Image (cartoon, rainbow, N blue to C red):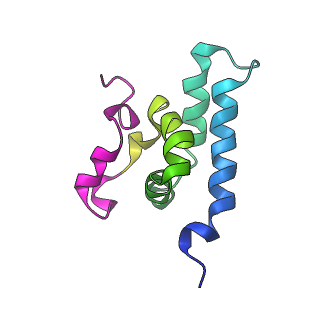
Amino acid sequence: NISITTRFDHYFRHLYRIFKYVDTSDLILDDERYEYACIVRSQLSDYELVMLFYNCLPTNGKYKFKPLIERYSIFNNLRREQLADREHKKEYSEKAYDRYAE
């Protein structure tokens, strides 16, 4: 049996590379980065957001992808009721859900 995260590892790696490119590319102006991240975010379904939420909590995601999720408020459209437990929301800073959070 292959775990669900193993089946989607390539997808999450690809998505990470897109956000990493938006974050570091010399071709994108700093004040445009958030807008490009929003374009990518808008392509994610509710279920993809939930899978991404849990995928980024283990060690690899926590140190690489999680900071990008928080920087670009990737979970802005995440429906909290779709999480296994609403308390899991605390695993990310408020910035992951709201660009203007402190």
Say whether residue 89 is magenta: yes
Residue 83 percent location from the top left of the image: 33, 60
Image-quadrant location for residue 34: top right
Residue 22 percent location from the top left of the image: 66, 29
Say whether residue 43 is magenta: no
- Above or below, 81 against 64 in this view is below
48 displayed left or right of 20: left
Residue drawn 55% across the image and 72% down it: 4
Residue drawn 35% across the image and 22% down it: 100
Determine the residue located farthest toward the left in the rendered image: 87
Image-quadrant location for residue 28: top right
Residue 79 percent location from the top left of the image: 33, 52
Residue 43 percent location from the top left of the image: 58, 48
Looking at the picture, tell me which residue is in the foreground, 25 or 80: 25
Looking at the picture, tell me which residue is in the foreground, 57 or 25: 57
- Above or below, 5 against 102 in this view is below
* Quarter the C terminus occupies: top left
- Above or below, 75 against 32 in this view is below
Determine the residue located farthest toward the front in the rendered image: 59
38 displayed left or right of 20: left
Residue drawn 40% across the image and 44% down it: 77
* Number of marks in the rendered image: 0
79 displayed left or right of 59: left
Determine the residue located farthest toward the bottom in the rendered image: 1
Write the start and end of the magenta stretch as one range. Answer: 79-102
Looking at the picture, tell me which residue is in the foreground, 85 or 41: 85
